Amino acid sequence: MAKVSSKDLGTQPIGKLLIKQAVPASIGILVMSLNILVDTIFVGNWIGPTAIAAINVVLPVSFFIAALGMAIGIGGSSIISRALGANNIEKALTTFGNQLTLTFLFTVTFAIFGLYFVDSLIPAFGGKGNIFDPAKIYYEIILYGVPILGFVMLGNNVIRAEGKPKFAMYAMFIPSVGNLVLDYLFINVLNYGMAGAAWATTGSYVVAFLFILWYFLSENSELKITTSQFRLDKAIVFEIGSLGFVTLARQAVVSVTFLLVNNALYNFGGETSVTAYAIVGRMMMFVLFPVFGMTQGFIPIAGFNYGAGAYERVKETIYTAIKYATILGTIVFLGLMLFPETITKLFTSDADVIRETPSNLRWAFAAVPILALQLIGAAYFQAVGKALPALLLTLTRQAIFFIPLMYILPLYFGELGIWMSFPISDVLSTIVTGYFLNREIKKTLVAKI
């Protein structure tokens, strides 16, 4: 394999770079999404439906701690990309060292806290009755591995910041494939039950961590830190925190939105409407993977060239990423508009759900072709280190527009109003993002070219 350098982000053609960065990111997202689905099928068939409920109880806690690693990784990676672009290697190294220290402190602290209050937290998240015992078994083992997952999420984002998308893809492949293999071994062969499911997941984290550790110790990485760079730097910690908070806020709003929509739909249509939303949610995870992959591929290119002062390349990256992501989003849109019944039948044979879900799918994805502008626009501000606009634009889609609309529109349109909230909030947030992105391009990029 030819050695790849972060300098390629500042020299290679933008279109070629975006494809090189986005394709591995998209494949990684797809594999992780498929892993969640297949893992659920394995656990449900080999242990039982209670096991699925037990895992769902634990996921919010483990996802939150893992999200800390992701937030620190994304926040610091923006700094690293810009520092490498500006040839400020010392700042890149110090940032990486500070990321490792922060990830260790936060994930270990929260894991200890979670283990200490295990008997209170599990019932609070719904682990009651027959669910409590299997949830506790799964929870305790998973929390041993969650700090390791935090380092995996951190490492994956830093690898991408170095301009090494294939290695970042491998880092996403390994825990996904490893989890399925270990599931089969621990649950189906060794019959370890719930503990086997937990050790399979934790074991996959360990294997992924060892791969990432090998990457940073090998010649593939440009970031060779010393012990002095683990010492926290106040300015860098603040910048990591402010940019990383954008990611944490996004994760929090997604969780709150799912909770609110589930409750609102249950009040209108009962379990059938909630099931329809579950299918819509799964489709958002699967079918939008190329658009999300393009967004992830865009970030290190924009950050590196911004740090290098190559503002014409930054502008070209923005326009090209929006064009490519819009094309991908349109393909997704056409598939969902033309075949919603076929897609629904992949998930269920329930006649009521099959009757209700297709129209809801069409409403939920009606504005997908323009969504690329919103996602790329918000990602741009995070990539160049502008935390406040990145945060506000990230929150416009769900927190600022969608949640109020899902309460207002049903007063006039009933349950349909909830589904109408999806495309309306997408359109409004895209208009707002487009305005601020266009102003930023004119004031910052064009003015400096």
Image: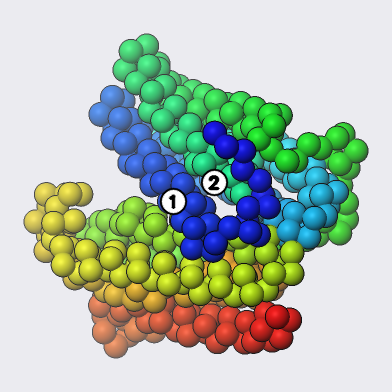
Kindly identify the residue that appears in the image at 41 percent across and 30 percent down. 177
Mark-to-mark CA distance, 1 and 2 = 8 Å
Residue hosting label 1? 23
Q: Is residue 404 visible?
A: no
Rendered image quadrant of residue 214:
top right
Given the image, on which type of amino acid does mark 2 rest? Pro
255 sits left or right of 302 in the view = left
Q: Which of marks 2 and 1 precedes in the sequence? A: 1
x and y, in percent, of residue 393 in the image: 57, 75
Q: Residues within 10 Å of mark 2 (few under 14, many from 20)?
A: many
Q: Are marks 1 and 2 in contact (CB under 8 Å)?
A: yes
Q: Secondary structure at mark 2?
A: helix
x and y, in percent, of residue 243 in the image: 69, 62
Kindly identify the residue that appears in the image at 75 percent across and 54 percent down. 84
Kindly identify the residue that appears in the image at 69 percent across and 38 percent down. 221
x and y, in percent, of residue 48 in the image: 28, 29
Q: How many marks do you count on the picture?
A: 2
Question: Taking 324 as reference, is 373 above or below it?
Answer: below
Rendered image quadrant of residue 334:
bottom left
Question: Taking 160 as reference, is 283 above or below it?
Answer: below
Kindly identify the residue that appears in the image at 55 percent across and 30 percent down. 208
| Quarter of the image with the C terminus in it | bottom right
| Quarter of the image with the N terminus in it | top right
Q: Is residue 107 visible?
A: yes
Residue hosting label 2? 165
Rendered image quadrant of residue 183:
top left
Given the image, on which type of amino acid does mark 1 rest? Val
Q: Nearer the viewer, residue 299 or 86?
A: 86
Q: Residue pushed farthest top?
A: 190
Q: Nearer the viewer, residue 92 or 231?
A: 92
Question: Taking 120 as reference, is 197 above or below it?
Answer: above
x and y, in percent, of residue 336 in the image: 22, 65
